[in-house]
Image (cartoon, rainbow, N blue to C red):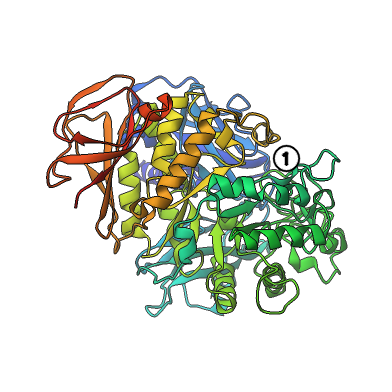
Amino acid sequence: MKKSILLFILISRILFSQNQLILSPHPTEKGTKFSFSLQQIKSSNKPELKKLSEIKINSISVAGSFNQWRRNENFMTYDSSNQIWFVEIPLKEGIEYHYKFVINDTIWITDPNAPNVTEDEWQNGIIIPIGYNKPYAINVNPPFGKRITKLQEFSCELFSPQGKIVKSSIECFLNDKKIKFTFDERKNLLRIKLPKNLSEGEHKILLKFSDDKGNRNEGFLTKFFLDRYKAKIKTPEFYERAIVYEIFIRKFFDGNGDGVGDFIGLKSKLDYLKQLGVNALWLMPFNESSKEHGYNVIDYYSIEKDYGTFEDYLNFLKECKLRNIRVIKDIVINHCDTAFIYFRDAKNNPASKYSNWFQFTDSSNSTWKHFGIEIDMPKFNFENVDVQDYFIRFIKFWMDPNNDGNFEDGIDGIRCDAAKEIPHSFWNRLRKEIKKIRPDFLILGEVWDGANYLIPFFEDEFDMLFDYPLYYAMQRYFDGSDLNGIERTMLHQTEIYPNNFQMMRFLSNHDNHRALSLFNNDTLKYFQALVMLFTLPGTPMIYYGDEIGLIGRTPPENVRQKMMWDIFENNLIYNLHRKLIELRKNYKSLSEKFDSKVKSLKFISTNNQKVKAYLRKKNNEITLIMINNSDDQVRNLFVNSVSKNNKGKVIFALSDFLQGKNSEREIDLKNLVLQPREALILKLEN
């Protein structure tokens, strides 16, 4: 009897251990299995999970990038004996997917057992499915791509659906060199003690292992980023005071009458852009492409034929140089088009010398890793040095096409599309090579993620990143859901990013809602957001057409419409852009950089939480900005200790601007009255 009880306890423990393991997404014969445990939420310390234990769960589904985030497609089944919900979904091996669980059709939560989680607004689970028949690794720590701030042990669990992992079969490599490990066969737990002298930056761990049935995993590759100290970077000063304008050439202006925007048309509108106050252009991709948007590149050294000839491009560039307008080229190097000549050579041809240029997922080169769900966008393999060399040559070509060393015929910067999908080691190498040639060349990265995730990209890689954290903080501020997010975001950035870091700050771009639509066509909120955009530190960016009030909500094709050239007369939105850009250029405090060394921004408390107030400083110049984020008049407002005599000179008032009045007057800061949705800019005595 005692033996039976002991055997039952032992079997129960084994089953419980197995159930714990399989809560994390893992391969099965039918696909990838996702699980959700009711026992886990009952014992969790996380508030968002504890709340779930108080409600009746009727349904759970999995929504993600594999099903276009449809919550009514992949429903889980409830296993009452183990109190576990589960579903098996056939997913393509080797593709990175983001996902969430949806409870009762309304509550979206992060999978508590996700192998990795995005560090952005959404906190989506991340999974890269693996094949069922071969052994695999789970519970990898640090997770793939994670930044760690102190040296720690690497660990993971090795599993096989077919048999037992054989310890003698395991090989471990750190940055391509063999490294010692320990393996607990009872727990399937592998540990690697990382060397104390490990350098800062990105590191690779490669594992090879087999089970006792002869199934072998020849390469489980993971990466982490060691970041114990703030980097020291130097960034191009021009962009600290620049006004950037994003252009979709195809939709901007047609110069040759064929109905498609082109370089001839763009050149003819440079005076318009100069008059607006713009001095830097971000051009969406203009290499030959199979798609209208240009992000499927076929030929990296040609001009999109719809945009004109190479001579048209050079003439446009020459006119930009004459007007001191810098040009930033959008480069798409994470992936290409299936019509790219090297991919055509390698597809279905394992013997091709370009096979290792791409991330094929089978031995016949008939399937491959691709960007998102776009199968016609095959991803490059940046572990291949030949790929790195190719793209460094490509960038150097567009910097100086005639190779004479003076850069008069070349671009002034690059916007790196999908930068987070390319290894840090490449960006580090690129920066070293490019800055050696031209130190004032801008390297701008698109890393659509949270503030902490951005840190490694400033570690001797990029000059500037897109400030999505502030974009979302602005959105939440004006919808009233987080009144302190802007202050919290900007102060946090100075704590975690190196001095001289630069941020591209925006209200819209080609992947997001039009700016006016972001605020649900509420022009007053949009005007207030513009005041903040042009008075906060960072590099303001305007998406073409936003300055005249174009509207549109994603999907992207709805926000990439033709520019309208016939609605400028008495256009308040256009006039406000011009006015705010003029103020930013005339008052240097408004464009002064802000980091842990240069304290040019200070948020000020008032006696009314509806009012956001902040100071901008440069030398002896001090400006005060106040935003009344309400539809009510604010009376008896007091702004504390910002001026010697508690007086300020108004240099801009939104209410005056809307009525066509002159704003210049002196006001008392001890007893202010702010009109509904007011935005003030004041100059203070030092």
Packing grade of label 1 (10 A; few <14, some 14-19, many >=20) is some
Q: Give x and y (percent) for residue 420.
A: 56, 56
| 574 or 628, nearer to the observer | 574
| Amino acid, disc 1 | Lys
Residue 124 in view: yes
| 418 or 96, nearer to the observer | 418
Q: Give x and y (percent) for residue 196.
A: 37, 78
Q: Quadrant of the N terminus?
A: top left
Please name the residue that numbered disc 1 is placed on. 251
Q: Is residue 471 above or below residue 218?
A: above
Q: Give x and y (percent) for residue 20.
A: 44, 45
Point 58% across, 64% down: residue: 423
Point 70% across, 67% down: residue: 398
- Quarter of image, res 600: bottom left
Point 43% across, 77% down: residue: 199
Residue 15 in view: no
Label count reads 1
Q: Give x and y (percent) for residue 254.
A: 78, 42
Say left or right for 572 vs 246. left
Question: The residue tagged with tag 1: helix, strand or loop?
Answer: helix
| 371 or 568, nearer to the observer | 568
Q: Is residue 200 above or below residue 502?
A: below
Say left or right for 620 vs 588. left
| 313 or 159, nearer to the observer | 313
Q: Is residue 88 above or below residue 443?
A: above
- Quarter of image, res 396: bottom right
Say left or right for 308 vs 56. right
